[in-house]
Structure formats: structure tokens, C-alpha cells
Amino acid sequence: MGHNLREGQSLSRQKLNKYSKPLKRGSFAHSKGQTAARSSAKSHQAERLDQNWLQSVLPSPQKSNDLSDEQKRERIAACFAEIMETLGLDLNDDSLADSPRRMAKMYVDEVFSGLNPANVPKITLMKNSMNYDQMIVVRDINVMSTCEHHFQTIHGTAVVAYIPTQKVIGLSKINRIVDFFSRRPQVQERLTKQIADALQTLLETPHIAVSIRAKHYCVIARGIRDTGSETSTSDLRGDFREDLATRDEFLAAAASPSR
Ligand SMILES: [Zn+2]
């Protein structure tokens, strides 16, 4: 009897382990340890960070659950099959049969992968050893996000600028930060702020500017069906907000035709 009970217990523990993959917290702790080990080597100029900076970023409205990515895919596929059936679609049709699974995979692994802190990009910062103190502008950053009100695409470009103090960031890392926060259900205002928060925290400079121009496919596909309109948002901080010349220089860079 007692033996059976133990067996039952260990079985359920195995089952638990199988389904509760080390998600957010596990990978947080893991990379923290790695970073600590690396920075103790001390020989490199480049500074590799753990993911704690994410906590300084305006949060998306999320409620954590214990589902693994695989469990999420299974549930979403079942729910999406129900939506399709409700619409009167025949899931036995060759062309439609795999759509629920494709949708689930696309949501979890691609368009909403930014909801999972485990997918946060690895950021490397360099010491600003040449004491560069002018504006650094990155333009034409692709923004591919999803409107959280209609789950339709938001597509546009971002212009990001900063004036460094002690640290500079690899330019492609700015694209990765924009991409990470884009891969969530979003409103453009929050996306703009999240990118600015992330850069302000990582670069430890108050002088940050983010501007996004995007088309919202919910506006194009439904309601008013306006294909031409664009939405602009910006978040100007530090000198980009206070200093008129800096502000004008950035806004001119952001507004001018890119190609
Ligand atoms: Zn919308």
C-alpha cells in the first residue's frame, strides 16, 4: 500500500516535470549565473547583461500561467479549431486541417514570442571609451507587431536615437529590442514606451528618443477601411525633450524620407 502510494507520487512528479519546463524564472536564474561567472573574468570590455532590465520596462498586461510552450500550442490549436468550426469551416478539408496547429505555432513561437521573458534578446554593451557625446540615430527599423484590440498586424518603422553617457550599444541590438517588444499584442503607444524604457535602463542615459510610424491593418481591413493613414507615436526624453535644437534634429531625422 505504502509502496503503491510512493510509486503514484513519483509518477505524478515525473508528469509534473515533463509539463513544467523551466520557463521564465528558470531561465532568468540561469542567465544570471552565467553573467556572474563571465563578469568575474573581468578581462572583456563588453558587458553582457542578465535579463533583469526587463523589470524596469512598462509591463504589458500579462498574467503568468505555468503552461509550457507545448501546452500553449495545444490549447491554442484546440481553441482555434473551435473558432473555425463556429464559422462553419470544414476542418476535414486538406487545406484547413492544419490551420489550428499553424496558428498556434505562429502565436507562441513567432508573433507573440515577446510575451515570454525567456526570449529576451542577449544585449551586449560597450564602454563609451571614445567619449562620444553626440546623437546616435538608427532609422528604418522594421516594426511588425499586432494590435491587441483586433489581433491584426501593425506594420511600420521606428527611428531610435540616444546620446550616450558611459555606455554604447551594438546597433543591431536596438533592432532586436524593437523586435522583441513588437512580438506581443500591442498598442503603439505602449510599444514606443517599452522600447524607450528598455534603452534608458540598459544605456543608463536619460537622453532617449523613439518614434514609430505604422499602419494598422485593423484600420485597413475593417471599419473605415482607410489604406493610406499612418499612426505616429514618439517618446522623447532628456535632451530630446528639453533641448530644442536636439529635439529638432531628431524630429527632422525621423520625418525625412528614408530611401
Ligand atoms: Zn486594432
Image (cartoon, grey):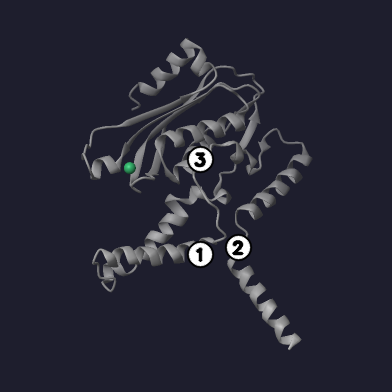
Say if disc 2 is inside 8 Å of ligand 1: no
In-image side of 41 versus 171 (left or right): right
Q: Amino acid type of disc 3?
A: Arg
* Residue ID at (69%, 51%): 29
Give the class, few, some or many, for how many residues have Cα within 10 Å of label 1's Cα (few <14, many ≥20).
some
Q: Nearer the viewer, residue 168 or 103?
A: 103
Q: Amino acid type of disc 2?
A: Lys
For marks 3 and 1, give the one nearer the viewer.
1
**Which numbered disc flags the more N-terminal residue, 3 or 1?**
1
Give the number of the disc on residue 70: 1
**Which numbered disc flags the more N-terminal residue, 3 or 2?**
2
In-image side of 206 versus 257 (left or right): right
In the image, residue 92 above or below residue 173: below
Q: Which element carries disc 1, helix, strand or loop?
A: helix
* Residue ID at (44%, 19%): 250
Q: Which element carries disc 2, helix, strand or loop?
A: loop
Q: Quadrant of residue 126?
A: top right
Residue position marked by numbered label 3 in the rendering? 176
**Spatial separation of the CA atoms under disc 3 and disc 2:** 25 Å
Give the number of the disc on residue 21: 2
Residue 132 in picture, x, y percent from top left: 60, 19
Q: Which element carries disc 3, helix, strand or loop?
A: helix
Query: In the rendered image, is residue 119 in sight?
Result: yes
